[in-house]
Amino acid sequence: MPELTYREAVRDALSTAMRQDDDVFIMGEDIAEMGGSMGVTAGMLDEFGPERVRNTPISEMALAGAAIGAAVQGMRPVAEIMYEDFLTLAAEQIVNQAAKHRYMSGGQVTVPVTFRTQGGAGWSPGAQHAQQLEAWFVHIPGLKVVFASTPEDARGLLWSAIYDDNPVVFFEHRTLYPLKGDVPEEIEPIPIGRARVHREGEDVTVIATGRLLHESLKAAEEAEGDGISVEVVDPRTLQPLDEETLVTSVKKTNRAVVAHEAVTRMGFGAEVASVLQYQAFDWLDAPIERVGAKFAPLPFAPVMEQFVVPHAEDVLTAIKRTVGKA
Amino acid sequence: MTLAKGDLQDVLREMLLIRRFEEKVEERFRAGELPGFLHVAIGQEASAVGVCRALEDGDVIASTHRAHGHTLAKGTHPNELMAELYGKQEGCSHGYGGSMHLYDVERGNLGANAVVGGGLPQITGAALAFKLRGEPRVAVSFFGDGATNIGTFHEALNLAQLWTVPAVFVLEDNKWAESTPESQHSPIRDLSDRAKAFGMKALKADGQDVEVVYKTARKALDHARGGEGPVFVHLDCVRFHGHYIGDPQVYRDKDEAKKLAETRDPIARLREKLEVSDEDFSALDAEVTEIVEASVEFAKAGTDPAPEDALKNIYA
């Protein structure tokens, strides 16, 4: 089984799709010669040329809207929004246009566009370059939302996003780009809407996305040492949500922690907690714990930034609380 | 390229049909039969008909919240449009859209947009798709002067010119952004300058003269289709009525609107040019009025969607 970094996995999905399908092309700021601000598209200009690896001006409304317009004509564009924070600039086109064309037209329009974006703290960019805004987009009927946390998932899910006939907002986490992992020899599409159980356990289920999946796996290892058996599940796609896998896990363990890097208040974990309490109420032995960023913009000074966002120890503390060992 | 006399007769008929259709919409809205938020383009029929007539099969348009005329001119049957305004399944958006979201994709109408300027970047994108695939098609966006202040306008034009895509941007400059006059919303008097600032070819024309609109649109479309890049078509238009149906227009001099309706009516102008007699005009009027009345009957007899149909068509 070959090993790829998360960055290479994203690139491999893009390049493979572009090799086999003229309708797939990519566009975004600095994605051509520079290879993208995160290096994801490095080398793609040489292979595919400037018509299909399109550098755009710093112009999120136009690049998002142009991708939507091309998608409505049957192409499968992948637009890169350099930082999640800049999704706010493209939000009108994504939220009011891409998400609603099919509906407003009574089913006449198909919008097979993918918006790739990334974010995440841990490198002190301050308040405008590392937010985690995935929950905003889960709130919009008409959009699908993916958050990949491993190389295999990034590749298989991005493939599915490109070939989905709906607009997909595809979140990547900045700190995961160098992460290495095994991937299948050939791309195996991962269906949108299916969670992944990363680790089986008996006492508590941790449901985590993005960087927090890896923090949760670390916390689970530590908890094991304390005699607590932890199951770790990554929903991978936030909309649609694989409720069945999450609920089944919690019915087995009777306890749940939801964890993400985004601000806890109104974060995606709130929705997961709601699903669990409603569908597994009689199975729960403890309140559902939530782990997320404190209610503050991301600060610059590293000590403050580290204080605001959650880490493995926060997940561990939450795990212990659910079993009464905190 | 100009329109032959027979075509002009048909143009007159089409403009009159749109006029009578919109008058009927106003009437039925005031009678409480039509839900929602409606905007008529009475007075601006020449722009819709002149531009859409110049299009080739395969060309696409994106419209605005003031979309009835564009929709009819792009070929949607009045029955389907009226049914949409009544929220019926037989409507051109099957009851999901309404007046501000009229679609007819089969006929190249990619949708009316209720967000001012919302459709422009997507027209740039549609044109990009045509260019990438080597298809001789043009994507056309309609918008008003109010839209020239919003970011999507500037970003969409910039990108279209940068990438020399086959797009035509049609400004229907009626001098009003809802209730705000152009003097209060734009620091420059000639809005073509905004397109020229991107290096875009800009053509200006009297939007109340359908022949001039047609000729200008043809020129713009030929330029875009020929691979020479997008064109900005600046039409000097007049909105006879308020922003929305029921708008008391407290912000506007009543005499001004009345005078403009008397002096710059595109239908009266073409009728005069074609020397249509009172008798012939009455016959034409009766013919289109009958079509409009039939559309109301069709719509009223249409099928109401089931409430739970609201959960369909969210995803492909």
Image (cartoon, rainbow, N blue to C red):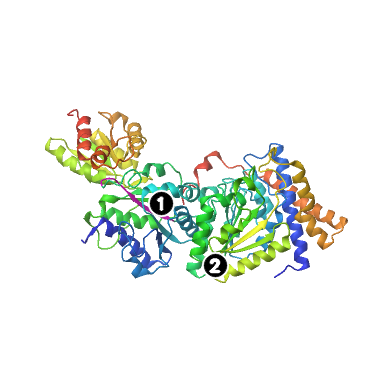
Describe residue B79's horizontal placement relative to residue B151 as left or right.
right
Chain ID of residue with mark 1: A
Residue A62 in the image: state x and y as whole percent: 48, 55
Q: Is residue A163 above or below residue A202?
A: below
Residue located 62% across and 61% down the image: B233
- Main secondary structure found in the magenta portion: strand
Label 1: which residue? A168
Where on the picture, by quarter, is residue A205? top left
Q: Residues within 10 Å of mark 2 (few under 14, many from 20)?
A: many
Kindly report which numbered mark, 1 or 2, lies closer to the viewer in this rendering.
Answer: 2
Numbered mark located on residue B241 in the image = none
- Which of the chains bears the disc numbered 2? B
User: Residue at position x 34%, y 39% from top?
Assistant: A297
Instruction: Name the residue type under label 2.
Output: Gly
Relative depth, front residue between A32 and A156: A32
Viewer-proximal residue among A293 and A236: A293
Label disc, if present, on residue B229 of the rendered structure: 2
Amino acid type shown at disc 1: Val
Q: How many marks?
A: 2
Marks 1 and 2 share the same chain: no
Image point (65%, 53%), residue name:
B173
Q: Position of residue A82 (x, y in %)?
A: 37, 53
- Where is residue A171? Give x, y as percent: 34, 50
Residue A36, image quadrant: bottom left
Q: Quadrant of residue A302?
A: top left
Q: Quadrant of the N terminus of chain B?
A: bottom right
Observer-nearest of A194 and B242: B242
Return the x and y of residue A200 as percentages of the image width and height. Answer: 20, 43
Q: Which residues are magenta?
A: A113-122
Give the SS element for disc 1. Answer: strand
Q: Residues within 10 Å of mark 1 (few under 14, many from 20)?
A: many
Q: Is residue B259 left or right of residue B222?
A: right
